[in-house]
């Protein structure tokens, strides 16, 4: 019998680590995550939100063990090698994560999952995996959701253990009721369908719908809280300017901790943003509009073109009488927030894919998902000094095509006027 190490956890109580998992945990790449907060700057709003990627990683591993045990109990034999890879992939899914949540990805740095490949194949972590007979390439494929493994959905999918842990943990640590989901019911409703992989049975539909609504509520009330987004916008500008000035390097940022990175950013910072974040002197809302006030498709460039956004911010600041760097535009995007792609195993033996119209036929929330996402998103303009920001002109600006914005910036034409 394996000797298990027990870790006490505020959310799941006892988390039992198998020897292979413990060997992985005791490597520098994983220990770094003790010092990377799960929710970035959310602690400036919710003081309890100081939990880390390390805690979340252990929680995901714990839920993977529970899910596999549940499947075994209901008659689905799981190959021991497959089970080991699923558990370790769940444990290591965030090993490449940047400091300060997803802010640096929004700032234009590579996605953290891409960085995981380097960590899995190098240093002491690679040695620990090799000693356990685990191929890091197969783990990385599971983390990226690229494996055809029937149980790959436990690591990356509509009902993966990552979501089950982070929604529960974030709500618990923030002290809000929005992320409460019926994890036990969801795990008990898991099954495996031949040729389709991980699936949910009909008895889990209510809990699944509750999970989706919890996700919507957490984005609306926690992840996209106006003060959290203000701090995130300031931090993105601070990091981008430090990278452009050569004061920090992308490779160093990728392996930094929260405190280590903010310390480096404070050294030689001429913008004042690092100290302002440290002292919680956040940019204030000059404009705050729900996405429902914007035409369909407007402002999508704000979520995927950080260079263009920075140029527009500085030009807009100048036109409004501010200095460049004193204005930030924020319009967060999470396209798959309420997305589903999961087989539903029905009582009559048939299988329906819960995606698109299939999901809408079985889940009431799926029918209004688009409107819920639009109600959660807000277009905000934050400023460091008071100034009036005209809503109508900003909506017009957000509605402009990217090419037109680039032309106006290049030709030094007004962004708020008719052009």
Image: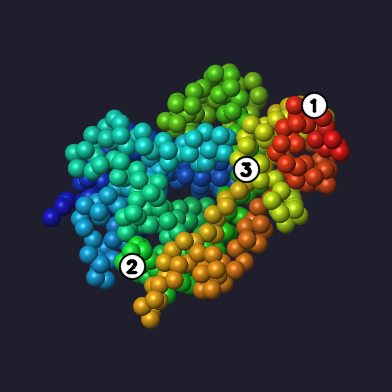
Q: Are marks 2 and 3 in contact (CB under 8 Å)?
A: no
- Residue 128 located left or right of residue 215: left
The label on residue 303 is 3
- Residue 262 point in image, percent of width and height: 52, 29
Q: CA distance from mark 1 to mark 2?
A: 59 Å
Q: Which residue lies most toward the right here?
A: 418
Residue displayed at 61% across by 55% down: 220
- Residue 71 located left or right of residue 335: left
Q: Is residue 89 visible?
A: yes
The mark closer to the camera, 2 or 3, is 2
SS at mark 2 in the image: strand
Q: CA distance from mark 2 to mark 3?
A: 37 Å
State which quarter of the image contains the C terminus: top right
Q: Are marks 1 and 3 in contact (CB under 8 Å)?
A: no
The label on residue 267 is none
SS at mark 3 in the image: helix
Q: Are marks 1 and 2 in contact (CB under 8 Å)?
A: no
- Residue 270 located left or right of residue 40: right
Q: Residue 148 is drawn in which quadrant?
A: bottom left
Q: Earlier in the sequence, mark 1 or mark 2?
A: 2
The label on residue 193 is 2
Query: Relative to 14, is 111 above or below?
Result: above
Q: Earlier in the sequence, mark 2 or mark 3?
A: 2
- Residue 135 point in image, percent of width and height: 25, 42
Query: Relative to 239, is 54 above or below?
Result: below
Name the residue carrying label 1.
412
Residue displayed at 47% across by 64% down: 181
State which quarter of the image contains the N terminus: bottom left
* Viewer-proximal residue among 124 and 265: 124
Q: Is residue 175 visible?
A: no
Query: Relative to 242, is 197 above or below?
Result: below
Q: Earlier in the sequence, mark 1 or mark 3?
A: 3
């Amino acid at each position: 019998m394996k000797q298990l190490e027990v870790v006490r956890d505020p959310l799941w109580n006892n988390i039992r680590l198998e020897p292979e998992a413990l060997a992985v945990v005791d490597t520098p790449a994983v220990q770094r995550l003790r010092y990377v907060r799960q929710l970035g700057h959310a602690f400036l709003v919710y003081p309890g939100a100081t939990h880390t990627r390390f805690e979340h990683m252990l929680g995901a591993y714990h839920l993977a063990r529970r899910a596999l045990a549940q499947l075994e109990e209901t008659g689905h034999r799981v190959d021991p090698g497959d089970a080991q890879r699923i558990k370790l992939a769940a444990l290591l899914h965030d090993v490449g994560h940047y400091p300060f949540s997803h802010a640096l990805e929004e700032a234009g740095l590579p996605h953290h999952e891409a960085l995981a490949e380097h960590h899995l194949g190098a240093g002491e972590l690679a040695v620990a995996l090799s000693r356990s007979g685990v191929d890091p390439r197969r783990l990385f494929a599971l983390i990226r959701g690229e494996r055809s493994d029937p149980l790959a959905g436990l690591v990356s999918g509509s009902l993966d253990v990552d979501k089950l842990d982070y929604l529960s943990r974030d709500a618990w640590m923030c002290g809000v009721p929005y992320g409460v989901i019926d994890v036990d019911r969801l795990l008990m409703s898991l099954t495996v369908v031949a040729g389709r992989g991980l699936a949910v049975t009909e008895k889990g539909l209510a809990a699944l719908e509750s999970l989706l609504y919890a996700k919507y509520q957490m984005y609306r009330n926690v992840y996209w809280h106006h003060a959290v987004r203000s701090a995130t916008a300031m931090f993105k500008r601070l990091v981008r300017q430090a990278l452009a000035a050569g004061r920090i390097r992308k490779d160093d940022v990728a392996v930094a901790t929260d405190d280590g990175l903010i310390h480096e950013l404070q050294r030689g910072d001429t913008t004042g943003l690092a100290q302002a974040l440290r002292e919680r002197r956040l940019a204030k809302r000059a404009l705050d509009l729900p996405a429902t006030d914007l035409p369909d498709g407007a402002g999508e460039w704000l979520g995927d073109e950080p260079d263009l956004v920075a140029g527009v911010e500085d030009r807009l600041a100048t036109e409004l009488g501010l200095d460049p760097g004193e204005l930030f535009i924020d319009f967060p995007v999470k396209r798959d927030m309420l997305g589903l792609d999961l087989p539903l195993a029905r009582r009559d033996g048939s299988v329906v894919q819960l995606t698109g119209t299939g999901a809408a036929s079985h889940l009431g929330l799926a029918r209004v998902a688009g409107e819920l996402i639009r109600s959660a998103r807000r277009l905000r303009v934050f400023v460091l000094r008071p100034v009036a920001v005209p809503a109508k002109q900003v909506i017009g600006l957000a509605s402009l095509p990217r090419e037109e914005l680039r032309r106006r910036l290049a030709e030094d034409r007004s962004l708020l006027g008719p052009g």
